[in-house]
Image: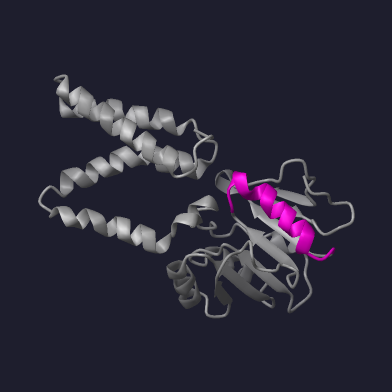
Amino acid sequence: MHLLRWPLPALLSWAAAWASFTGLMAAGLTIGPAMSASALLGAGLALLHQARWRRLIVALGFPLSMLVVLRSAALPAWTWLLPLALLALAYPRRTWSDAPWFPTPQGALTALRKLAPLPANSAILDAGCGLGHGLRELHRAYPEARIEGIEWSGLLASLAALRCRWAKIHRGDMWAQDWAPFALVYVFQRPETMGRVWSKACRELPPTAYLVSLDFEISGQAPLATLALGRGHSLWVYRPGSPSSESP
């Protein structure tokens, strides 16, 4: 599954679960056992993924879609296009090469100020800010900082700007933006992009700046600090601009 580009593994897993359900029903199995067996297949395929959010998406795909089918038999066929249109609007195709929307949990950055102290009025960037959950947590940790967010999805960037009026939100490419003006860059990305995050941070961040990652460490790099959070989350703090830092 790791050889396929996301979300193709999820789509294939959901298709396999539905194919299983269709085949079991055709073989004469009743709907209950057929649904249970197909849901178990989807859960098994979910275990092939390392990221928790991917496992959850894959495992819930078949049961949720079956629930929708059972409850929406009377709906016209064109209504199925609405969620697809909304997904395409919220997440343009290239967004899936970074990280789909998954919010920063409330309280995840409460202790960050102790791990990464900053002077008042420092500039902080949430790279890939989504709906602004990370922006809010950064604002709680650093109430005197100048906080900015950048988000590729125009819809999510607009909603984040409405939710976080004290922050400066840009609709744009986090990889093209210059990180040099920031004293701290916060990311909640995916494992596959962390090497690219590190390389960019080493090139652009000043020696005193911090790179903070939620959940995903940078392979081969020693963090300045780590913190285990509740519900399986963890915080990783790096100083990529320091002379001792090297790109992987």
- Is 84 in front, or is 57? 84
Q: Where is residue 70 in the image (x, y as percent from the top left)?
A: 17, 43
Residue 50 shown left or right of residue 180 in the figure? left
Residue 2 shown left or right of residue 22 in the figure? right
Q: Residue at x 27, y 27 (%)?
A: 20
Q: Which residue is drawn at 49% across and 37% down?
A: 4
**Can residue 17 be seen?**
yes
Q: Residue 79 is drawn in which quadrant?
A: bottom left
Q: Residue furthest top?
A: 27
- Is 244 in front, or is 105? 244
- Is 224 in front, or is 141? 224
Residue 173 shown left or right of residue 208 in the figure? left
Q: Which residue is drawn at 61% across and 64% down?
A: 174
Q: Residue 112 is drawn in which quadrant?
A: bottom right
Residue 237 position (above or below residue 144): above
Q: In the image, is residue 200 part of the stretch drawn in magenta?
A: yes
Residue 153 position (above or below residue 121): above
Q: Residue at x 62, y 49 (%)?
A: 193
Residue 52 position (above or below residue 177): above
Question: What stretch of residues is rendered in magenta?
Answer: 189-207
Q: Quadrant of the C terminus?
A: top right
Q: Which residue lies furthest to the right in this view?
A: 243
Q: In the image, is residue 166 part of the stretch drawn in magenta?
A: no
Q: Position of residue 122 (x, y in %)?
A: 74, 75
Q: Which residue lies furthest to the left in this view?
A: 74
What is the tally of numbered marks visible in this picture?
Answer: 0
Of helix, strand and loop, which mostly describes the magenta segment? helix
